[in-house]
Amino acid sequence: MTPPPDPSGFGFESTADEVLAGVDLSGRVAAVTGASGGLGLETARALAARGAHVVLAARSTAKLDEAAASIRSAILDASIETLTLDLADVGASRRSAIELLGRIDRLDLVVNNAGVMCTPFGHTADGFETQFGTNHLGHMAWTIPLLDQLQRSAADGSPSRVVNLSSAGHRFGDVRFDDPNFEQGDYDPWEAYGQSKTANVLFSVALDAQFGHVGIRSVAVHPGGIHTDLGRHMTPEMRAVIQSRIEQSNPGGFSWKSVPQGAATTVWAATTPEFVDRGGVYCEDCGVAEVVDSTDAPPGASTGERTTGRTAGGADSAGDRSGGVLARAIDPERAGHLWDLSAELLATVT
């Protein structure tokens, strides 16, 4: 059973192409991270199909070439290019942003789609915990240099947007403001993932609060339960635990989304008129999610993330039909605190 559609006419089962039907993106420029496969590739393809010039950004040049070729084979007049981006390296992220700015004369949309999940304990090139460093700090380092161009492009009256992919997995863990790199205590991959996904939401809130008035709106997106390769670090034991949680949290059954359905909320958030004058929200199923308190979420809710395999794991999904975003993840004060902390951490990298 799927939830009713959003008043916009789109909902759980909508696809990216359905959301963008009739939308003209000619003359618009979009950059999509993690665009070498999965949701990022589908997002890039759907935007290009509506006339946008799309920059596909990812770490692997070979995979980017394959992704670009697949789009060109499906859309003969697609306007696309590729850009190498390593979010696990702050300096490299900044350099990629500068390279992008040297190639384009406008930028209307940034979709921060890339990410890692449930990695073993480790560090990025700059010594940050892998998931927090890649999913949040890497994207922040990449996005900040792009803000001036986003603002200039918004001067024609069409607000620019930054769409950050988060997850129902934000319920797994809060931001550890005093110890974001797990230098104290035991490391838990799910808690670390939850911290990074909470950070993605808070980053959206802070970004919108600081730059919404100059034409840059920012929102966070939970795409739903989709099978991709994000969960490649999960062990069979971890998959079994997640499968059990999904079953407990969804006695009425759980429905996965296809990749085109998973990309729908991203392209909806990127193009809907609803965010012309507001942002700083968390979206799911092509609508703005309800704000809930942690006590409203049943035990084991928000389980599973995007992974391969049809058994356990395998979704950027809560497995919780009630959905929603925890109030702590969109709290403006906490968003400002995270912005300040992140700026301090990024400032240590020259």
Image (cartoon, rainbow, N blue to C red):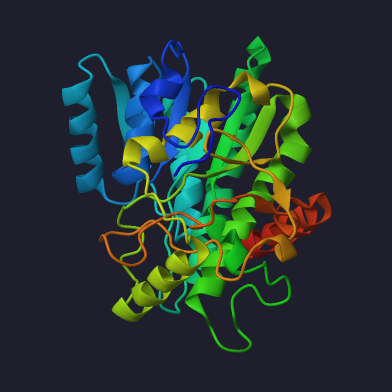
Would you say 227 lies left or right of 247 here? Answer: left
Q: Residue 9: where, in percent of width, then height?
A: 53, 22
* Frontmost residue, 189 versus 249: 249
- Please count the marks in the image: 0
Question: Which residue is found at the position 47% from the left and 54% from the top?
Answer: 317
* Frontmost residue, 106 versus 91: 106
Which quadrant of the figure contains the C terminus? Answer: bottom right
Question: Which residue is found at the position 56% from the left and 31% from the top?
Answer: 269
Q: Residue 40: where, in percent of width, then height?
A: 37, 41
Q: Residue furthest right?
A: 333
Q: Residue 319: where, in percent of width, then height?
A: 48, 57
Residue 334 placement: quadrant: bottom right
Which quadrant of the figure contains the N terminus? Answer: top left
Question: Which residue is found at the position 66% from the left and 44% from the top?
Answer: 204
Question: Which residue is found at the position 51% from the left and 48% from the top?
Answer: 94
Q: In this view, does 278 lie above or below 321?
A: above
Q: Is residue 104 above or below residue 165?
A: above
Residue 83 at least partly seen: no
Residue 19 placement: quadrant: top left
Q: Residue 16: where, in percent of width, then height?
A: 40, 28
Q: Residue furthest front?
A: 252
Residue 77 at least partly seen: yes
Q: Is residue 310 above or below residue 282?
A: below
Would you say 17 lies left or right of 196 here? Answer: left
* Frontmost residue, 121 versus 39: 39
* Frontmost residue, 302 versus 200: 302
